[in-house]
């Protein structure tokens, strides 16, 4: 999952976990995580925008959390395809 996420433009992994169920990703600063979340959800993929985890909105508008806890390899591949397609084909400007 980490290797495939590293290949996707417009994002970077904030911390490479040694284990666990979640991967935090920092989207490019011109991408709003809330808009990204809704566009993914329309495609059947649920990711969590970072702003729901913080009490302030400073520097959280471009963070998302990806859960891999109950996903099969096939579901993860499909999810990565959706993430890449949404990032490559949608306008997410903050304004």
Image (spheres, rainbow, N blue to C red):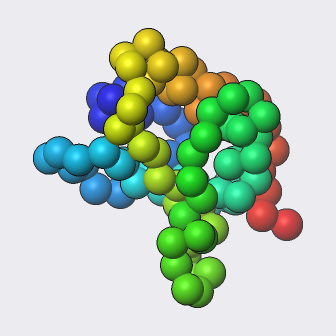
92 is higher (above) or lower (below) than 73: below
Tell me the residue at 71%/58% (across/down): 34
Residue at the farthest front position: 70
76 is higher (above) or lower (below) than 45: above
- Residue 31 is left or right of residue 8, and the answer is right
Quadrant assignment, res 4: top left
For this rendering, which residue is in front, 83 or 8?
A: 83
1 is higher (above) or lower (below) than 75: below
The quarter in which the C terminus is drawn is: bottom right
Q: Is residue 61 visible?
A: yes
Residue at the farthest right position: 95
Tell me the residue at 42%/43% (across/down): 67
- Residue 68 is left or right of residue 93, and the answer is left
Q: Is residue 88 visible?
A: no
The quarter in which the N terminus is drawn is: top left
For this rendering, which residue is in front, 19 or 15?
A: 19
Residue at the farthest bottom position: 56
Residue 76, percent from left and from top: 44, 24
Residue 26, percent from left and from top: 48, 56
Residue 89, percent from left and from top: 76, 30
Residue at the farthest top position: 74
Image label count: 0
Tell me the residue at 39%/32% (across/down): 70
Tell me the residue at 36%/48% (across/down): 23
Residue 65, percent from left and from top: 47, 53
78 is higher (above) or lower (below) than 91: above
């Amino acid at each position: 999952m980490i290797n495939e996420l590293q290949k996707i433009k417009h994002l970077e992994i904030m911390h490479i976990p040694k284990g666990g169920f979640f991967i935090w990703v920092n989207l490019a600063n011109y991408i709003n995580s809330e808009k990204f979340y809704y566009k993914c959800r329309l495609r059947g993929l649920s990711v969590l925008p970072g702003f729901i985890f913080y009490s302030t909105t400073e520097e959280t508008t471009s963070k998302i959390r990806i859960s891999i806890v109950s996903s099969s390899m096939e579901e993860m591949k499909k999810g990565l395809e959706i993430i890449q397609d949404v990032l490559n084909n949608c306008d997410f400007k903050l304004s």
